[in-house]
Amino acid sequence: MRIQKLPVGYSDFKTIIDNKFYYIDKTLFIKEIIDESCNVILLPRPRRFGKTLNLSMLRYFFEKTEKSNGYLFKDLAICRLGEEYMNQQGAYPVIFLTLKDVKEKTWDTTYRGIKDLIQNEFLRHKYLKNWTGLEEEEKEYFNKITSLEGSEKDYENSLKTLSLFLERYHNKKVIILLDEYDTPIQSGYLENFYEPVISFMRNFLSGGFKDNTSLEKGVLTGILRVSKEFIFSGMNNLGVFTILSAEFNDKFGLTGEEVQKLLIDYNLDNKFDDVRAWYNGYNFEGVTIYNPWSIINYAASLKKVLKPYWANSSDNKLIEDSLTHNGKELKNELLALLNGENIVKTLKENITFEDLEKHEDMLWSLLLFSGYLTASFSHKNNREINFYNLSAPNLEVRTLYYDLLMRWFDKRMERDKQELMLEALEKGNIEDFEFYFSEFVLNSFSYFDTGGEHAEKVYKSFVLGLFVLLADKYELENEREAGAGRCDLILIPKDKNKLGIIIEFKKVDARKKEKMPQAVKAAFKQIEEKQYDVILKSRGIEKIKKLAIVFQGKKVWVRENCEK
């Protein structure tokens, strides 16, 4: 059977179905939209998690068109539900806008971009222009919008006005679909034109979705629920369903079953464990979700390389700026995340950009809803405030944290030296590995406390982050139960003929007048007594190298003990 082409870079539902691209059936999203009692639905999800595709699907399902689009849904899950739902296919006029590409440096260019999109949507309904049901002043308004000569107030009112025209023409209330509504708002915050963009968007959204008698149902997607001066205030008909909600929790991103089927279809089912380590880990209120952008790009790549497709797919300026402004304490939290540890925090579902630098819970919320953390409920305190366990969802996100930490070091290690260091380790050349590692520590660790109680975490976090670059060749086990204890780090080669590596970190305890040789001896004693090599031997790994990384401040030694 011919393997279908994967829709890399495509987000239009009709294009995907018409061209017989591989499609993961998410049409039950339509059922959930129809069944939802709120007539305005906001669905914040991380970028590249299928938001535009899903809203495109809603458009082709609901929109009344001259030529039916019903064939697009043949044999899909929504069609199998029968007439109860399919009788709404092609039944409504639809307004569809996506703001995903409105990423500008100034308010003028942002406003022009929004005007262009509104103009195009009016032109998509140009049959209204000469309709006798419009009054002369209404025709003048239509012409002003399509000729880009309207006032700012005209464009703020455009959603409401167009929906009114469409309802009168079709004698049917209107469905409004607004994709990535917060993209220009984020740009406004980053590029210092926040006030004009938030003012425009507040009026634009209010006109379209608040007390709009022509509205049948509205669906908005974005990354965040923006809360500047209550941008959604007064919308009593609004339902907000974030990744912390049970509703719609499997409709964006890929479930484990969907990923397994895709990998089987592309003869990659033996790679499931690797794919899971790199791209899953998102908890959408009880459902484990995989990053769809990375999964599809991985399966479509010629060499099937596991790498950070999603993290590298656009700039992370908002995330990086927010993290950079939050001081040294946050860097220690990132070290914990890089180590695979949980941190317990409160969260805010409403994001106020001005408070990102003032309130820690706002920052963690930004990271969570943007896809850089995953969360599970921890506990309530005595004031009924919810606390959540936060962690890095997968290796892909941990590479981003690692790169960010590298930028915070006084001097970043050049990529070629990183590669030489890793190559030396892979080949078992510990003398060279120690040389490069020591050089990096000496030049770059001044920002972190390498003499305090968290010193081991600093060293371990760097090594762990560095070894993420080896994840296509090794399984990385951090604090893994091995033998009779927990080893700091084990590198398990995917090729059994390669070298397996056990690493134990030890700080020289100057308070006890300990010297380097004593710390080395203690590290190897722990490796031997706790039988950390059991896990490697059980995998059939015969070549094993045991390393002690011992440090005192910024002085570091790497010593080895081999089995052949």
Image (tube, helix red, strand yellow):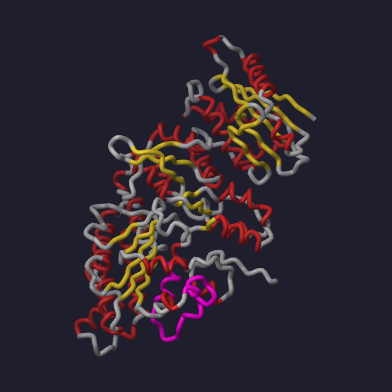
- Residue 214 sits in quarter: bottom left
- 10 sits left or right of 41 in the view: right
Residue 343 seen in this snapshot: yes
| x and y, in percent, of residue 392 in the image | 49, 43
Answer above or below: position of 403 versus 10.
above
* Circle count: 0
Q: Is residue 88 above or below residue 499?
A: below
Give the magenta part as a residue range: 55-81
The image shows residue 408, relative to residue 237, as above or below, that is: above
* Quarter containing the N terminus: bottom right
Q: Say if the magenta span includes residue 78.
A: yes
Q: Quadrant of the C terminus?
A: top right
Q: Residue furthest bottom?
A: 132
Residue 348 image offset from top left, x and y in percent: 33, 46
Q: Position of residue 518 (x, y in %)?
A: 64, 14
Q: Nearer the viewer, residue 561 or 421?
A: 561
Q: Nearer the viewer, residue 392 or 297?
A: 392
Q: Residue furthest right?
A: 564
Q: Residue at x 47, y 58 (%)?
A: 250
Q: Is residue 369 left or right of residue 358?
A: right
Evaluate whether residue 151 shows in this view.
no
Tell whether position 456 is magenta: no
Q: In the image, what residue occupies the spot 53% across and 64% down?
A: 9
| Viewer-side residue, 415 vs 557 | 557
How far from the left and from the top, in percent, is residue 553?
53, 21
Q: Is residue 480 above or below residue 21?
A: above
Residue at (36% x, 70% y) in the render: 117
Task: Specify the quadrant of the image occupied by residue 165.
Answer: bottom left
- Residue toward you, 144 or 138: 138
Q: Residue at x 42, y 56 (%)?
A: 45
